[in-house]
Image: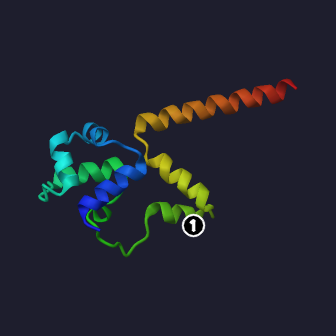
Amino acid sequence: MDIKQTLISIRKDRGYSKKTVSEMTGIPYTTYIKYESGERKDISMDSIIKLADFYHITTDYLLGRKSTSSEPIDDLAYQFNMTTLEKKILDNYLSLPKHMRTDLMEFLYKTVKEVQEELNND
């Protein structure tokens, strides 16, 4: 898979629009759409790094290179004997922008606290 296909695939898998990726990475929108259309093949190293950081993937993965070592998420899943579902939840959580992860954790904390209080009152 070439970088154009990788960009399209990962963006769609994560549910982002082209505009969102452009805004979140700081890559000009017109430049980003040229990356995905294949019109621009000379992607700068800066853009590659920004995209890899945004998606929490390696630059090798983005460039279509096969890694001989396992991904950190795979190592973690093995170490804690995670199910496929648990691994997918963690992977998706880590792919969220930092502010969204913070909001999600606050929501989960609040929900657990409310349930614990209800159980203590029974």
Locate residue 18: give its quadrant.
top left
Whole-percent x and y of residue 95? Answer: 43, 48
Q: Amino acid at mark 1?
A: Tyr
Q: Which residue is rendered at x = 35% and y = 72% of the image?
A: 67
Q: Furthest residue to the top?
A: 121
Tell me: 49 left or right of 74: left
Locate residue 61: give its quadrant.
bottom left
Tell me: 90 left or right of 65: right
- Tag 1 residue: 78
Q: Quadrant of the C terminus?
A: top right
Whole-percent x and y of residue 52? Answer: 30, 53
Q: Furthest residue to the right?
A: 122
Q: Quadrant of the N terminus?
A: bottom left
Identify whether 3 is placed above or below 29: below
Q: Which residue is rendered at x = 40% and y = 72% of the image?
A: 69
Q: Which residue is rendered at x = 63% and y = 64% of the image?
A: 81
Identify whether 14 is placed above or below 20: below
Q: Nearer the viewer, residue 29 or 83?
A: 29
Q: Furthest residue to the bottom?
A: 68
Identify whether 15 is placed above or below 48: above
Whole-percent x and y of residue 40? Answer: 12, 55
